[in-house]
Image: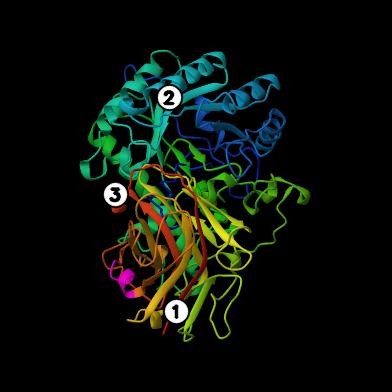
Amino acid sequence: MTQPSTLRRRLVATGLAIFSTLALHACGGGGSSSAPAPAPAPAAGVRALAADFYTRKAVAYSGYRGADRNTAPTTAQVLEDLQLLTQANFKLIRLFGSGDADSKVVLKTIADNHLDIKVQLGVWISGSKATQDTENQAEITRGVALAKTYSDIVMSVSIGNETMVDWSALQVPADDMAAYIKQVRDQITQPVTTDDNWAFWANKDGKYGTDKILAAVDYVSLHTYSLLDSVYDPAFSWKMESTPEPQRAAAMMDAMIDKAKTDYGAVKGYLTSKGVTLPIIIGETGWKAAGGEANRDHPVNQKMYFDRLNAWMGGPKQIFYFEAFDEPWKGGDNGWGLWDVNRKARYVIYDLFPANMQDGGTYAAADALYYKAPTANPTITANTYVLFADTVPAGAAQPSGANTPLTSWQPWDSPATATGAIIGTSTAEGANALEISPNPKDWGWGFFLGLANADDLSKFNVADGYLNFSIKTTYAGKLEIGFFTGSAGANTGVDVYLAIAPGQYGYQNDGAWHNVSIPVTAIAAKAAPAYGQPASAALNMAQVTNGFVIADRYAVTSNTPGSKIKIQVDNIYWDHH
């Protein structure tokens, strides 16, 4: 899954039901004990998917285990993964690209070990012909070669992943994508598709070049993520507040699978309206077992989602569950795996593995998460509220709950648009400071201090209230500074950021430490609904959920894109006099 998680999911940060048998089929929504529905007859010129493409249990797979993608999985690690997958009866895997360091190793390992695993191979397309054609052509060359060399393993090929939906950070014009698809298809014999969000395939609001792609592919592979999308749709009530709490988790999960069905139905309806009879599969869907989606991500909820997905009959002919294994390099978008990064089975597949191969958790249905109205913390009455400092003044308040120097700092988007490290030299205060390393996307980057529990900082939004911090950098141009109130999950999320230039509020970018003091009222005046939040989302100083945000959105700052100059911050606190 590509997580423009977050331009699409910017501030919220792409397993299976316990099967009674390993022989369940992945048809009609992830599998059932009944025989799969027959595939539709292909239209003239359309390549049919092989029959066992529909009957094999399917999952998305990537083997990266580290905090970044600099270290590819070894052949031994790939073999370990593939053996776990076959033990759980996953015999159709989706690969996202055609890289020599990963996908080529996977295919060779399958062949060398005579594993009964088939593959939907990916060809990673990362932008338009005008800007990225050299890179894209190199990837196409690799993908075509793999599809030919391993033609007995590669059942189909998907060119591009979430490239045409409007929130994609990998935007590819439909004409370019159609040309790339044709280029690949002309050189191989397998059926081809492109994986994209359901809204693209349904031509939502009539704004996409969907018809050009429908004319180029052999089947449709759509993505649906109720966990993420539901909270950005004001018309969709996932919270089920009118349902008594003992039944609320089940009601929420019922609504979530209904949303996936609605997404699929929108795509099917659009194809029908165009007289198109292509097979429709779900190329990605899943549920987080962990990772920060408040009121929703939990191993029991993950199981509940896939139980319902597994019971869905008469829908898509195949579903690739996202995903096999956790991938820490994805930062806030991690936690979707059927296995954790240590290859321990999560609750959803406990029945398939002995205790020594499980993650060690003990769960019951009553553990499922569901929406609970936030409980307001008492108003902070102290004159000083310290977020990050080695020395806390007597009488100062601090965030409630667990907040540690690094675990509470989080990046915008996934992959992370910035990383943080605690440094112990040349600090502004005490023994420790925070060094932020931007890793920007084309729109910018952001880093924030998330609070374990929202705090009521109403008393600081006054004429003599200030947000203070020390900063050392040579970063060119403006920086956005501020905080975040409300909750994206409750459709109340509000961005509260002020762009400051060198020379304002004590800020300088000359490479020396400077103390910055910004009136909270000046920052609060910039409050606006966060991305994807309804217009009704309003500043709520009684529910500050991110106590400090530093960012650079180029559309706001007008900075030249791409700077990776490091920024050090220290001694972050709010005060009023």
For label 2, count other residues whose C-alpha is less than 10 Å away and answer few (under 14), some (14-19) or many (20+): some
Q: Position of residue 295 (x, y in %)?
A: 50, 65
Query: Would you name the residue on which mark 1 appears?
Result: 575
Query: Would you name the residue on which mark 3 appears?
Result: 558
Magenta stretch containing residue 419, yes or no?
no
Q: Which residues are magenta?
A: 521-526
Apparent side of residue 105 relative to residue 122 in the rendered image (left or right): right
Front in this rendered view, residue 329 or 75:
329
Identify the residue shown where x is 45% and y is 35%.
317
Apparent side of residue 158 relative to residue 95 in the rendered image (left or right): left
Apparent side of residue 245 relative to residue 180 in the rendered image (left or right): right
**In the image, what residue type sits under mark 1?**
Asp
Q: Position of residue 231 (x, y in %)?
A: 39, 59
Query: Would you name the residue on which mark 2 appears?
Result: 135
Identify the residue shown where x is 70% and y is 47%.
344
For label 1, count other residues whose C-alpha is less than 10 Å away and answer few (under 14), some (14-19) or many (20+): many
